[in-house]
Every structure is written in C-alpha cells, then in structure tokens.
Image (spheres, rainbow, N blue to C red):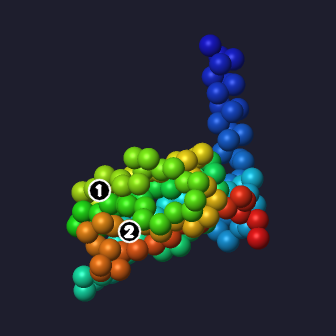
Amino acid sequence: MRYTTLLALSVLSLVAWIPGPTEGSVQGPEDAPDVVEIRMVDKGGGQWRFEPAEVEVVIGQTVRFIMDDIIPHNVQFKDMPDGADLGSLVMGPFLIQKGDTYEVEVDGRFALGSYEYVCTPHEPLGMVASMTVVASTDR
C-alpha cells in the first residue's frame, strides 16, 4: 500500500513538472492542438459571427463550436472541395444554451481544401465563416 502511494505521488509530481506550451509559443504540425475552438458570438446590433471567422485545420483535429450567445445557432457546411463527403455533418444541431458545444472530427470525410459554413438562420446577417483543411500546419 505504501509503495502504491509513493508511486502515485511520484507520477503526480512528474506530471506537474512537465511544461506545456506557453502563450506565444510556436507549434509545428506534431504539436498542433487536438481541438480548434470556434465561438458563436453576438457582436451587437443584430450581427452574429463565428470567431475566429477563418481557421486552418489538419486531418485528425476536432473543431469545437461553442455557443457564446443566448440566440440559437447551428453550423451548416455550404461550399466544400471535390472529394468531400460530409454526410450528416453537412448540418449540425442548433445549440440552444450558452456553453453548449458541437464537435466535428476532421477525418477521412474531409478532402483538403476550403469549406464555407454558415449559421442557417443568421447567414443573411453575416454569420459566415471558413475552414481550410491542409496537409500540415507548416508554412
């Protein structure tokens, strides 16, 4: 029992010591975050937006849409490259409450290229954004 406790404390100490990325640090494709977050926000005056409006992702990442408003929003992919086969991902559910999330795994259904997506009811009000799927995040 005592050995197990000492081992657990040693592991916790080691994990607490391992540094993570710092603000402003440069990340290569092997360090790309697993989750890319996009917020659905109210900019006031009847202007709703996705923030950021443009993202770059690689196969294997997850895009998490986060409801940061009190008006329901969704995600509908409109324009996409040849070879993309999103199936049911073409239109996501409506997020109703602040803090609700919708996650899309960027996998084999996605071809490399640019994807335009909108919030279906708020597209005429400018809630339009794009996601580019690239082979790696190196530039």
**Secondary-structure class at tag 1:** loop
**The C terminus - image quarter:** bottom right
Q: Earlier in the sequence, mark 2 or mark 1?
A: 1
Please name whichever residue, 112 or 58, is drawn nearer the observer in this view of the structure: 112
**Residue 118 placed where, x, y %?**
38, 68
Seen as rendered, the residue at the extreme top is: 1
Please name whichever residue, 71 or 123, is drawn nearer the observer in this view of the structure: 123
Foreground tag (2 vs 1)? 2
Residue 118 - label: 2
**Residue 51 placed where, x, y %?**
45, 72
**Residue 41 placed where, x, y %?**
35, 72
10 Å neighbourhood of mark 2: few (<14), some, or many (≥20)?
A: many
Left or right side of 8 for 40: left
Residue 95 - label: 1
10 Å neighbourhood of mark 1: few (<14), some, or many (≥20)?
A: many
Quarter holding residue 47:
bottom left
- Distance from disc 2 to disc 1, alpha carbons, whole Å, reads 14 Å
**Secondary-structure class at tag 2:** strand
Q: Residue type at mark 1: give it.
A: Leu
**Residue 38 placed where, x, y %?**
46, 64
**The N terminus - image quarter:** top right
Please name whichever residue, 8 or 83, is drawn nearer the observer in this view of the structure: 83
Quarter holding residue 128:
bottom left
The answer to whether residue 94 is seen in the rendering is yes
